[in-house]
Amino acid sequence: MRELIYYSFIESADLKKTFIQENRDFLFDVFKKVAEVLLSGGTLFICGNGGSAADAQHIAAELVGRFLMDRKPVPAVALTTDTSILTAVGNDFGFDTVFERQIEALGRKGDVLLGISTSGNSENVIKAVLKAKEKGLLTVAFLGRDGGKLKGIVDFPVVVKSFSTPRIQEVHLTLGHVMCDFIERFLFEGKGE
């Protein structure tokens, strides 16, 4: 059991190291695009299931509240939080439409949707992304494994190449934190490069 603890940390650290070495420049481009949407008055919508739903809420909270600096709130909405909408839409139209329906109601051209899916195949995230693209939103996804179906659909697929769901989620959490830090600095300190 001691080895389990040790190797879990090493596996997580190694995956993060490999991921950033392969994606450093790409992440700059992705985070800059998201920050530019927010700077232009757009809103960041975020969705996912299970642990990814928690990540969506976490990112929205960091942006609407604060991450590291005291500043004005940044418009971010987790589509995973309104139980009345989730249960009504899930009951009346099916669970695979719970995020799509909210994007249809709330999303506007010039906004951005971040979908989070460790498999890349979450049907309700796929439908939300397709609706977002139809409405002219920028689409980004934090994915795992080989990126799944979402990899070929979103404008910016950020793929963590692992088949371990916990390790993928650990990289997604780091991605969320780094993105929030980037957004704060870009919007409130003007650090574009």
Image (cartoon, helix red, strand yellow):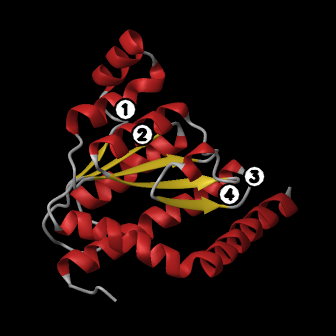
Mark 2 vs 3, N-terminal side:
2
Q: Is residue 168 left or right of residue 95?
A: right
Marks 4 and 2: in contact by CB < 8 Å? no
* Residue designated by label 2: 130
Looking at the image, do the residues carrying marks 4 and 3 touch, with CB atoms under 8 Å apart? no
Q: State whether residue 131 is above or below residue 27.
A: above
SS class, disc 1: helix
* Mark 1 nearby-residue class (10 Å; few <14, some 14–19, many ≥20): many
Q: Which residue occupies the foreground of this view, 6 or 15?
A: 15
Of circles 2 and 3, which is in front? 2
Say which quadrant the C terminus sits in: bottom left
Mark nearer the N terminus (4 vs 1): 1
Locate the N terminus and report the quarter of the image it occupies.
bottom right
Residue 141 is left or right of residue 162, and the answer is: left
Q: Position of residue 109 (x, y in %)?
A: 22, 50
Question: Compared to 175, does 150 lie above or below?
Answer: above
Looking at the image, the residue that sits furthest to the top is 92
Kindly indicate the quadrant of the structure image that contains residue 190: bottom left
Q: Residues within 10 Å of mark 3 (few under 14, many from 20)?
A: few
Judging by the rendered image, the residue that carries numbered circle 4 is 167
Q: Earlier in the sequence, mark 3 or mark 1?
A: 1
**What amino acid is at disc 3?**
Phe
- The amino acid marked with disc number 4 is Arg
Q: Is residue 11 left or right of residue 2?
A: left
Please name the amino acid that badge 2 sits on: Leu
Tell me, yes or no, whether the two marked residues, 1 and 2, touch with CB atoms within 8 Å: yes
